[in-house]
Amino acid sequence: MLARSCLRSTRTLNGLRNGANNVTKRAASTSSGAANEAVPTRLNVAAAASTTLALGSMAWYYHLYGPVAFASTPAEEGLHPTKYPWVHEQWFKTYDHQALRRGFQVYQEVCASCHSLERIPYRSLVGSILTVDEAKELAEANEYPGEPNEQGDIEMRPGKLADYLPSPYKNEEAARFANNGALPPDLSLIVKARHGGCNYIFSLLTGYPEEAPAGTVVAPGMNFNPYFPGTGIAMARVLYDDLVEYEDETPASTSQMAKDVVEFLNWAAEPEMDDRKKMGMKVLVVTASLWAMSVWVKRYKWAWLKSRKLAYDPPAESKVRH
Amino acid sequence: MGLWDAFTDIVESVTPWSTVEAEAPAQEQEEAPEADSKDEEEEEEDEEEEEEEEEETVDPKEQIEEECKNAPQCASVKHHFDHCVERVQQQEEDGGAKEDCVEEFFHLAHCATDCAAPKVWARLK
């Protein structure tokens, strides 16, 4: 079969190259002389052997390299988070800024006692989460080191919009000391920093089972969370129903708070997302317009060529042979 | 069970290195033959009780996932999990669990959250 199709392809090639030879070639290839009787058999054997070799080498390769070795158990790997239909992850959707506001409230009231958000200044909250006055009021509630006075001492001053959100601990060592050796990570870029992003953090926050599955050994001071690699996490479950009271009277269920705070953390990691999507749409609009223009210009430029008419005007017959 | 599941099932059944897992039928009480390839040596059992939550606001995620765990599509994994819990508790009574149910729990949680995800999002703001 393979040999026959090969022959056919050479025949068509020949036919393309030289139409005149076509008929004779085809006649030659279809003729069955006594001398050529052995050739198809040999071809069949060669084809079968080469095919066997090819398939065999593939099988051998798969046998050697196909199965992937997983060095870790599922528990060490952690449960992969389910994909949730986040609205803000869609191409033409923005953050829900009401949700960001609720999420910031959850961060402040729940997360901020252990987790810092040190890359976010108050000024970036203005316009997307808080009003100017709210942000100023929030900043002034904290003290920051100011300029040196005439004696060279640094005095504390109330915060300004340009200051960054305060961290709960002075440094990493203090954070570890207060948390039994575990470091609560900074949350500024946590959505980008964790595999699974929003889904992972949402699953982690809401995924604490009421009790660990039977037979599980949870180290002292640790908590069981299936989504955390190794399943033993130092952070206990923090979100409980009605833990915060939303100003817009959204029912503060555990998953609602988790969803809001995750969307807020996504904003913290990617505050430029709304602008980026807007810019992307601008790019699409501009390129679409340019393309449309180029099509019209091409039509215009080629009009003379496309609309011309070629006519062959043969010279008059004459007796003179050139 | 989509087309992909059917295909991967066939591939897994003919590959010699894959794990053998017999899927239990949904309603059958008879125990399906299980061959769990877990070799984690866990000698002690230590269960930490999570705090009970207040029931003023009902968490839609918890509620829907509970429904999903009992839905027919998760019946098989739930059966495996329940069976594992039963077995491990028996082992604990006999002095020391030889395995844990983390893997079965993962499968059940994966099935339940997968089923619940769009429904939860429809309920949340």
Image (cartoon, coloured by chain):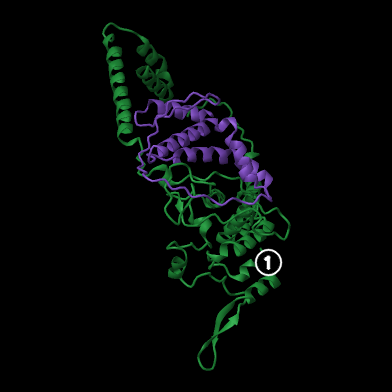
Chain colours: A green, B purple
In front: B105, or A195?
B105
Neighbour tally class for label 1: few under 14, some 14-19, many 20 plus, Cα within 10 Å: some
In front: A236, or A255?
A236
Looking at numbered disc 1 in the image, what kind of residue is underneath it? Leu
In front: A12, or A130?
A130
> Residue at point 45% right, 57% down?
A221
Residue A141 can be seen in this image:
yes
Quarter of the picture holding the N terminus of chain A: top left
Disc 1 marks which residue?
Answer: A130
Q: Position of residue A111 (x, y in %)?
A: 57, 62
Q: Is residue A68 left or right of residue A162?
A: left
> Residue at point 42% right, 26% down?
B33
Residue A284 can be seen in this image:
no
Subunit under mark 1: A
* Residue A162: quadrant of the picture: bottom right
Q: Secondary structure at mark 1?
A: loop
Q: Position of residue A295 (x, y in %)?
A: 63, 46
